[in-house]
Image (tube, rainbow, N blue to C red):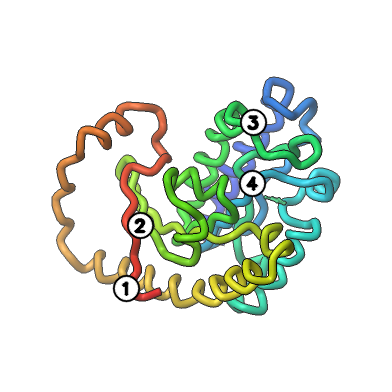
Amino acid sequence: MDRNTQQKSHDLEVLYAQLEKDAPHLPLAKTATDIVPGEGPSSAEVLFIGEAPGYFESVERRPFVGKSGQLFRKILETESGIKPEQVYISNIVKVRPPDNRDPSIEELAAYKKYLDAEIEILKPELIVTLGRFSMGKFLPSAKISQVHGKLHKVKWDGFTSFVLPMYHPAAALRSTATKQAFTTDFKKIPKIIAWIKEQKAVAAKQKPEPEPELTPLQKEFAKSDKTLDALQASVIEHLF
Ligand code: URA
């Protein structure tokens, strides 16, 4: 393990220890054992973000291990050739909402800083959002039926990331058409990662371009504490 990876693993341990300490003050959680932290190698190139743990996730304290998780893990491996152990998997909200209901605005807000910290520590090449809640973090006005499987470049506060929105596996379990789209989108991942790396290699050779002037809306965002919310999202459609 190189120093950078070791540092990331350490930072994640510190983050999850803090999250467990915060549990009694967080919505949905009563004790540290209610928390389902993210899972995967800290050197992962891809970060998958779901919505919130379900029953089986909260029992095992691992993300995506129930019925929809099993579909996600299987399709990841068969369609993209990437093993689930090679990617990082986390959720917007780290505790199971009762009866698997949608997370509330307050719950999303309370857990936001932990996901933001995971992203900052991991600095993944690619973020894949599973479902409309995690998509909404980066592309607040997008419709999942229109943008799934399209690579987006999202910028915030000095940090650029690539975001690929996908359907939630639970939706794929409910509809054959959605499962078809979900499966097709997974096939694109290896090509997308290769393309991102190529872009980075080209950019590293070039002189950095001066940052474009921010629009008034972007300046507003930049002043707020929403450092990891989308400032600017552009769709990259020419390849995928
Ligand atoms: N659904 C999610 O969004 N996340 C999980 O971890 C499990 C099911």
Task: Tell me which numbered mark, 2 or 4, is placed earlier along the sequence.
Answer: 4
The kind of residue tagged 2 is Lys
Task: Tell me which numbered mark, 2 or 1, is placed earlier along the sequence.
Answer: 2
Task: Tell me which numbered mark, 4 or 1, is placed earlier along the sequence.
Answer: 4
Position of residue 77 measured from the top left corner of the image (x, y, whole percent) = 66, 75
| Cα–Cα span, label 4 and label 3 | 21 Å
Measuring 73% from the left and 43% from the top, which residue is drawn there? Answer: 36
Q: Nearer the viewer, mark 4 or mark 3?
A: 4
Is label 3's Cβ within 8 Å of ligand 1?
no
Q: Circle 1 is placed at which residue position?
A: 238
Is label 4's Cβ within 8 Å of ligand 1?
yes
| Cα–Cα span, label 2 and label 1 | 13 Å
The kind of residue tagged 4 is Glu
**Which mark is on residue 153?**
2
Task: Determine whether 144 is above or below 92 in the image.
Answer: below
Q: Circle 4 is placed at which residue position?
A: 51
| Cα–Cα span, label 2 and label 4 | 21 Å
Position of residue 129 measured from the top left corner of the image (x, y, whole percent) = 54, 55
Position of residue 34 measured from the top left corner of the image (x, y, whole percent) = 78, 35
